[in-house]
Image: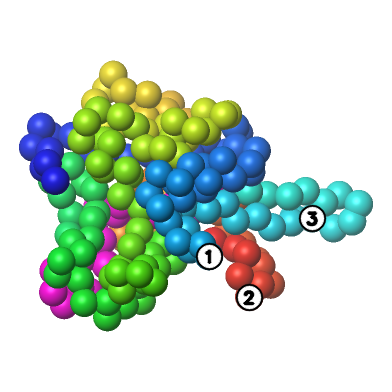
Amino acid sequence: MAENNSGKQWGMVIDMRRCTGCHACSVACKSENEVPLGDFRTHVRYFERGTYPQVRRVFMPIICNHCDDPPCVRACPTQATYKREDGIVLVNDKTCIGCRACMVACPYGARYLHPRTGTADKCTYCVHKLDEGVAPACVNTCQGHARIFGDLNDPASEVYNLIRNNRVTVLKPDLGTEPQVYYISASIQTTKSEQEAGRGV
């Protein structure tokens, strides 16, 4: 797998003003990466806000945040989980022992144990396509252009300018993991009941 030494920092912006909760991203990801039934590398959580009759449904796409300071890397006893120079966090299937330490360390619930390989699996930004110059499957499939992917260090990139010109947030910023997935107009905060129901972020 090619390493990127060009000074790039790959990242994603998810513009919630454009997300319709259609799950096309989840379907595209499962198809592209042969994700097993019941597991996801990316998915869209949803929950309801307000009280009747003023109720609305809120969508929240969840994906590996490819953190700049990833706790999963520190937790891995075999160094199977590692971060490339371009910021992408990956898992080496040959050295992963399936101990789930990275799954416990990830505060975003972005990993699962692959039932066939017995190793940890997660979003890779479709690195097999990215290294050939093709954007991740979820980005290419998003009909509303809610997912924007690119080089966070490039002033000419769309992601760079979206972050610069909009009020953005990340998931659980208090943890200090420095996620590289940014949200525009997201309802990040969840209530205790939503969290207990497993629908919050």
For this orientation, the residue located farthest to the top is 156
Give the residue pinned by disc 2: 196
**Label 1 CA crowd tier, 10 Å (few <14, some 14–19, many 20+):** few
State whether residue 167 appears in this view.
Answer: no
Judge left or right: residue 129 versus residue 7: right
* 52 vs 162: above or below: below
Q: Is residue 161 left or right of residue 192?
A: left
Count of residue discs: 3
Which is more N-terminal, label 2 or label 3?
Answer: 3
N-terminal of the pair, mark 3 or mark 1, is 1
Which segment did they paint magenta?
Answer: 61-79
Say if residue 165 shows up in the picture.
yes
Name the element at disc 1.
Answer: loop
Q: Residue furthest front?
A: 116
Picture quarter with the C terminus: bottom right
| Three-letter amino acid code of the residue under disc 1 | Gly
Residue 38: numbered disc? 1
Tell me which corner region of the image, top left, top right, bottom left or bottom right, holds residue 76.
bottom left
Residue occupying the point 41% across, 62% down: 110
Q: Secondary structure at mark 2?
A: helix
* Residue of label 3: 50
Relative image position of residue 148 (x, y in whole percent): 42, 32
Q: Residue 168's spot in the image, x, y percent?
A: 46, 40
Label 3 to label 2, Cα distance in Å?
Answer: 17 Å
Do callouts 3 and 1 mark residues in contact (Cβ within 8 Å)? no
Looking at the image, the residue that sits furthest to the left is: 5
